[in-house]
């Protein structure tokens, strides 16, 4: 057991398990202390260096005047990690501890490896209930709150089956400083991390209590829907599922935290009610952003080549179009054929005319020859009479 201080507030911290094992921080629920995790320590210390601490306003840690905020509680956790010289830890928180874990995942993501968010929510809408609890704790004391709290924390079956464990938790509730309890109620009342957790990319396990009236199953499912790749496990328990179903809780947590690789599960986004905005995409890492920018730049450089290719494409098809145009115009060849026929006809007519002319000339020659012959014959007859 050790004591650490931040801003004048002392924190009660315990460490269990091998010093060289991976570190795992456990964060308690509202109204309890670090001993709420006693059922987990024997199994967890086989694998981890377990760090437990009493949240500000609880157990043996300081309880300054409130109100507190989830941010202040998250910075307390970071101060404890710094004091223990842990650069990064795995995180497991239940109820208020899960709310602190969500803040760390979004505001100090480099300090968290894997996270278990058990029986928790990212927003508590009924502010009047929290204001009433604050007044009751400060005016009447923690004992006045006990009956209603225990009914929400354990099912009736468990309360009958294991009254000793229930009484152990009752004592934790009674010894919680009323001022610290009320100040933490203010932090929970004012919290809204529904949008912020959309940016989470860590491996996350959400543990849900099937009979939990304090943080109903719908709250756990909302967290799982908003965190990309988050896994869920539902246990047959009320709010303190790590106590009511200790064995099943331990097995689910250890399987998740010790898995060689926790791959994000692909889920179909839920249908959203009318008027609600769809979930935003998780914020990409700087490396992913640079990679996308380089890809866009490369695509931009290649674009002109595509345009040139597009311009050249018609020239390749032009000969085919011209050929098609020639084939589709049969009139010109027909005209050539008809002119050649006319030429042949003219030549034939010319030959006939030449033949007729030749025949006429030969006829004229024959007629001339005959006349000449007849003249010669007549002259010969005349000579003979003489």
Image (spheres, helix red, strand yellow):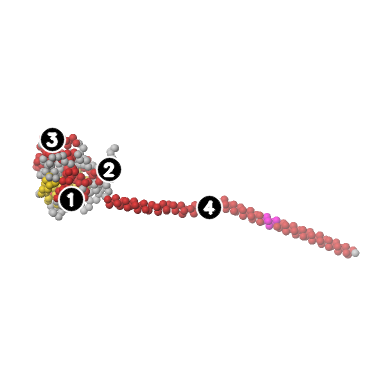
For marks 2 and 3, the one nearer the N-term is 3
> Where is residue 269 shown, x and y percent of the image?
28, 44
Q: CA distance from mark 3 to mark 4?
A: 100 Å
Q: Earlier in the sequence, mark 4 or mark 1?
A: 1
Find out whether the residues at labels 4 and 2 contact each other: C-beta distance under 8 Å: no
Numbered disc in front, either 3 or 4: 3
Q: Badge 4 local density, few (<14 within 10 Å), some, or many (20+)?
A: few
Q: Quadrant of residue 236?
A: top left
Circle 4 or circle 1, nearest the eye: 1
- Give the structural element (helix, strand or loop) at label 4: helix
Residue 111, percent across and down?
19, 50
CA separation in Å, label 4 and label 1: 81 Å
Label 3, secondary structure: give it. Answer: helix
Vertical relation: 126 (above or below) 375: above
Residue beneath label 1, please?
A: 89
The mark nearer the N terminus, 4 or 2, is 2
Dot label at residue 73: none
Q: Which residue is mark 3?
A: 136
Q: Which residues are magenta?
A: 348-353
- Mark 1 / mark 2, whichever is N-terminal: 1
* Direction from residue 345 to residue 310 in the image, left or right: left
Residue toward you, 360 or 79: 79
Q: Which residue is mark 4?
A: 326
Q: Was residue 350 drawn as part of the magenta stretch in this picture?
A: yes
Crowdedness of circle 1 by 10 Å Cα count: few (<14), some, many (20+)? many
As measured in the structure, the alpha-carbon distance from the residue carrying label 2 to the one carrying label 3 is 38 Å
Residue named by callout 2: 279
């Amino acid at each position: 057991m050790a004591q650490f201080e931040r801003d004048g507030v002392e924190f009660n911290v315990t460490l269990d398990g091998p010093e060289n094992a991976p570190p795992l921080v456990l964060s308690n629920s509202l109204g309890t202390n670090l001993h709420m995790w006693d059922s987990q320590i024997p199994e967890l210390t086989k694998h981890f260096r377990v760090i437990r601490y009493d949240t500000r306003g609880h157990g043996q840690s300081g309880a300054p005047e409130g109100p507190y905020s989830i941010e202040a509680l998250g910075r307390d956790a970071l101060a404890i990690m710094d004091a223990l010289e842990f650069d990064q830890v795995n995180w497991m928180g239940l109820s208020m501890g899960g709310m602190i874990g969500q803040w760390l995942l979004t505001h100090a993501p480099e300090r968290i490896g894997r996270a278990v968010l058990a029986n928790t929510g990212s927003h508590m809408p009924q502010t009047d209930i929290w204001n009433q609890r604050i007044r009751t704790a400060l005016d009447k004391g923690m004992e006045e709150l006990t009956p209603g709290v225990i009914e929400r924390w354990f099912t009736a079956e468990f309360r009958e089956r294991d009254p000793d464990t229930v009484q152990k938790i009752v004592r934790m509730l009674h010894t919680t400083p009323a001022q610290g309890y009320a100040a933490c109620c203010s932090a929970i009342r004012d919290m809204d991390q529904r949008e912020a957790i959309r940016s989470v990319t860590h491996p996350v396990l959400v543990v849900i209590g099937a009979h939990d009236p304090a943080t109903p199953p719908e709250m756990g499912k909302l967290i799982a829907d908003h965190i990309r790749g988050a896994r869920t496990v539902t246990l047959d328990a009320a709010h303190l599922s790590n106590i009511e179903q200790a064995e099943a809780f331990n097995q689910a947590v250890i399987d998740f935290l010790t898995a060689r690789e926790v791959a994000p599960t692909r889920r179909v986004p839920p249908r959203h009610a009318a008027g609600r905005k769809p979930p935003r995409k998780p914020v990409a890492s700087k490396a992913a952003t640079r990679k996308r920018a380089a890809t866009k730049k490369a695509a931009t450089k290649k674009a002109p080549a595509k345009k040139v290719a597009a311009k050249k494409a018609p020239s390749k098809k032009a000969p085919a179009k011209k050929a098609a145009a020639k084939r589709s115009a049969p009139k010109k060849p027909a005209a050539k054929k008809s002119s050649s026929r006319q030429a042949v006809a003219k030549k034939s007519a010319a030959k006939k005319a030449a033949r007729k002319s030749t025949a006429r000339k030969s006829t004229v020659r024959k007629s001339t020859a005959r006349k000449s012959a007849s003249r010669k014959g007549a002259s010969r007859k005349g000579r003979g009479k003489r």
